[in-house]
Image (cartoon, rainbow, N blue to C red):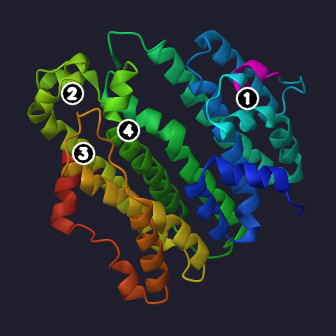
Amino acid sequence: MPHALNESLSDLLRATSRSFYLTLRVLPAAVRQQIGLAYLLARTTDTVADTEIVPIAKRLDALQQLRERILGRSSAALNFGELARQQGAPAEKRLLEEVGASLAALPRVSTDDQERIRDVLAVIISGQELDLRRFGSGAKPVVALATAEELDDYTYRVAGCVGEFWTKICRAHLFPAVPLDDAQLLADSVRFGKGLQLVNILRDLPADLKSGRCYLPRAELAEIGLTPEDLGNPQNEPRLRPLYDRWLDRAEGHLFAGWHYTNTLPRNCRRVRLACAWPVLIGLETTRRLRDSAVLAPEVRIKVSRREVRKILARSILRLPFPGWWRQLVAEPSASAGKAVASRTHLA
């Protein structure tokens, strides 16, 4: 297969996300180009959606134009000059300026892979459009999701579907003949993606509130006598904490499914195992810190340091050849504890 990403796009990928670029570099060459291209396109659509200075109607129109180009339904030129000029980060400005080059790379992957990339981008864009329509301009009062089902749907659209895409690409190119329970593998991959997104949502709660959005369901907040606006007051943390911890339980349950997914992959797929293990380990470390920290303080943003990330990477690489030692990287809950968590978080 010809290289989908030229040197310029590879450099753009590196500038856009250093952490994901490390993951991409460890992946086998047979899937690296397709996953990298899908990531670039997803980051481009995300940049369009997040350019708050541009009116929502224009962002929705730009997303629709970009979706039609990605899906191959249109060949109209894209003019994202205004959006590009509004970017504060140079990498995001380049994403929009080079959108034509990213789209031109799509026909350089196989027809089957084009379909997989288009499928996942269609779902991701639907989630971004839903988010824009739901939260509007971010003006007060704070807008919250209504129910847990809405939050579950959102985490699928923007992250759970990525687990499916990743699995289908790797299955097709790396271990097509290995006998596996594909239904379970896909189910675990969806939960894996949902877990990563939930961690981001729980970590970013104060910043989202400041922008006028709340992903914690209004119905569940009402049960503990809180409104989304009440979360702007750090003094309400003790009342919020039980609900917040239940959502942390759910995020961890999804990440444990991601760890099961990682260990279901064939043993000889060591690079893919590493690429999956890293976000699981970083995600679980983030949830641990969130449990031990005040989460309504807007000046505090919980983040695993680069130094700690390097330790996680080194530890996982060292343990990879030793199955027993490798599995000890994650302390999975006992069967009884796992059932309790599943019951609390509707994962049974």
Per the rendering, the mark at residue 67 is 1
Q: What residue type is labelled 2?
A: Glu
**Residue 5 visible, this orientation:** no
Of helix, strand and loop, which one carries label 2? helix
Q: What stretch is highlighted in magenta?
A: 79-84
Q: Between disc 1 and disc 3, whose residue precedes?
A: 1
In the displayed structure, 231 sits above or below 170; it is above
Spatial CA distance of label 4 from label 3 is 16 Å
Pointer 2: what residue?
Answer: 220
Q: Between disc 4 and disc 3, whose residue precedes?
A: 4
In the displayed structure, 135 sits above or below 323; it is above
**Dot 2, crowdedness within 10 Å: few (<14), some or many (≥20)?**
some
Per the rendering, the mark at residue 201 is 4
Pick whichever, 96 or 63, lies toward us: 96
Pick whichever, 224 or 301, lies toward us: 301
Please tell me whether residue 219 belongs to the stretch shown in magenta.
no
Of helix, strand and loop, which one carries label 4? helix
**Residue 15 visible, this orientation:** yes
Q: What residue type is labelled 4?
A: Ile
Q: What residue type is labelled 1?
A: Arg
Please tell me whether residue 83 belongs to the stretch shown in magenta.
yes
In the displayed structure, 63 sits above or below 22; it is above
Asked if disc 4 and disc 2 are in contact, CB closer than 8 Å, the reply is no
Pointer 3: what residue?
Answer: 345
